[in-house]
Amino acid sequence: MATAKGIERSSVIISVFSTTPGIGKTIVAINLAAGLASEGYKVCLADLDLQFGDVLNYLKLTSKTTVAGAQRALLDHPKTFDVRKFLIDYSNNGITFSILPAPLYVFDAYQTDINIVKEIINDLNFCDYIIIDLNSMFSALNLAMLDISTVINYVGVIDFLPALKNYKIGYDTLIRFDYEESKIRLVENRADSQKLINSNDVERLLGEPFYHRLPNDYPSVKKSINTGQPLMFAAPDSKLTKSFGELVGLYSNRPHSQGEAVTDIPTEKNSGGLLSKISNFFGF
Amino acid sequence: MAYRTIVIENDENFLEDILYVLHRSPDFEVSANYKSAQAALGQAVMFKPNFFLISVDNATMLNSVKNFVETFPGAFILGTMSSWNPVIAKQAMDNGITGCVLKPFTAKQLLDYIRLYSARGLHKPAELISFFSPKGRAGRTTLAAVLALLIAEKTGERVALIDADLQFGDLPMFFDVEPERTIVDATQDIRLLTPITLEPYFHKIKDGVFLLASPARPEYAELVTPESLVDVAMMSANIFRYVIMDLPSGFNPLSLNLCRISDLVYVTTMINSGFEVKHTKKTLEMFESQAGENSKIHAVFTRVNPFTEEQREKIAEQLDYPVDVMIPNEYQMISVANSGRLARGLPQDTLLMKTISNLADEIIESGK
Ligand SMILES: Nc1ncnc2c1ncn2[C@@H]1O[C@H](COP(=O)(O)OP(=O)(O)O)[C@@H](O)[C@H]1O
Ligand SMILES: [Mg+2]
């Protein structure tokens, strides 16, 4: 992919997207960034949930510089613009990754220009990995980011029928929008949470297996958010941390220690009377 | 019994048209016609009229509607307009008019309008109520749906649900319906519609509750302009006493415009990681900076735990804004919504239902 300056982009862009809000995108984005950084890669996490971004919240950071400031600087002084001035670092135990924070005010978020954001992201080309945290709509900004992404980490939690509907509709829409199937990585979050809908049925419905499944682990996530640290520091021994390690392995082509086996998450066999309802709704 | 009708119209051509139509219909009997409101107010009482057709194209006549409502309580008063004007229709409603009709009309259309406006409920302006949430997954849709069912049940008046969460609207699924016509059709046709012809775009959920569904595919959302949706919402206010709108998450031209025309905006947030209060605070600041004041904006928190007054105060303090509504956690609700059984039976006697029922009472009271 060519950047604005005509240089072939070398960094991998992973966008974290979903069509239902509040299902773990930001948790996934933060832990991908931390995991890839711990493998020695240079990583930047861009918070493009512009109006209500949570990256700084979850890491207990505050920042004076944001993507809104970067936009202003790029407009005012395009020649001297240096994106690095607008990043802040998260460091813990010798592991560091950069963050491009979301604007502090909704009004600034509202004024964001998609083409400028694209340029800013392109300027992050000095990184090995750029992780982009998005919100849950097919907005022009999100689509522009999905376009420039190497892979789309498409997250779903299948605990609620409308959420399943939105996951399926979102996937079908991505395909209709001509994103290659190989680029879309279906990631199920909270995969073993008490639920009425069976993962196998979901895979049948999507016509595509999950690329990875992250277990439900509310205590660890809570600890992570409360201490403002990625899971590898807040809950190093948890199942969820291990599962993130595997996902990072998949994205860095270095399968994490135990080989490539995906965490074994038992699927419930009995999906109750709901399956027939889903079948009716989706007509399969 | 034919309607004893008074026609007030200062345009010769329209007057001729209207009289021609009424004279040929067995359902209407023209008692008198006037060219000014003043004359009608002075003389019409002699005919014990129960039906008025007043041209609201004329500002003086529009303003006089109040006097007719006062002098002829119980009469059906329809404003006639030569082209549909949502602002005038709203002013006429504020003045207590039964409803507006588009000129020219047939006798059958007049009867349709009478049926429509009788079913609507009190001859009062509609309450436009928006459910906004900063990020979504807030319990917004559940709250809007249950509220619509309860208000209809309590008042016997008509309630509209507009699923303006265009890309990922869940209301059709909550009610287990797949309406043929959606918001896309309504907004594309709105220029040609009248209240009577807009009504069939709504899908009847049950007595008194009607849904204007979101489109089947996310990309169809692009076909809906904020202006046309504002027009649809404003025309719906003529058909329904309550218009409840489920908005897309966050600030966008659509949510901002619908909030602008709403009488009540509920900013709904689900307590989860704790940062939601911060998001709500940012939301309130944005509304304030847009409108200069926040009097119609109410903060709602769902899944509040512990469900106590202390907790309410704690959140309000963090927010620096009153917390008008707190909704408790209720797992049962999820399974009800999950099954599409929402219209068939709400969970009874739960704390959740009691809280939403109280909110319905408050809204009904404020609309009287
Ligand atoms: N694997 C998980 N196990 C348990 N809870 C989770 C998990 N992933 C996310 N959560 C919970 O979901 C909430 C929303 O996550 P978040 O990443 O903010 O979602 P999004 O970015 O998609 O809006 C978090 O506050 C957290 O409590
Ligand atoms: Mg997020």
Image (cartoon, helix red, strand yellow):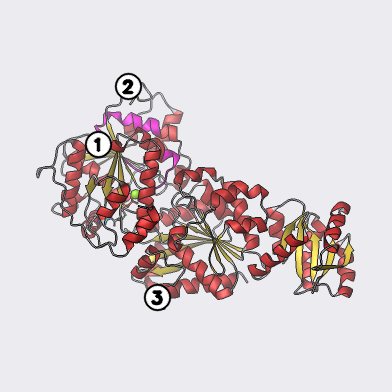
Q: What element does badge 3 sit on?
A: helix
Q: Whereabouts is ligand 1, in terms of quadrant?
A: bottom left
> Residue B319, located in which quarter of the rendered image?
bottom left
The CA distance from mark 2 to mark 3 is 61 Å
Image side of residue A154 versus residue B354, left or right: left
Q: Is residue B311 above or below residue A116?
A: below
Is A257 situated above or below B117? above
The residue beneath circle 1 is A43
- Magenta region: which residues? A118-141
**Is residue A200 magenta-colored?**
no
**Residue located 81% across and 55% down the image:** B58
Nearer to us: label 1 or label 3: 3
**Mark 1 surroundings: few (<14), some (14-19) or many (≥20) residues within 10 A:** many
Q: Do tags 2 and 1 sit on the same chain?
A: yes
Taking depth in this image into account, of B331 and A73 the one nearest to the observer is B331
Measured as percent of width and height from the top left, residue A204 is found at 28, 50
| Residue drawn at (48%, 63%) of the image | B144
Q: Amino acid at mark 3?
A: Leu
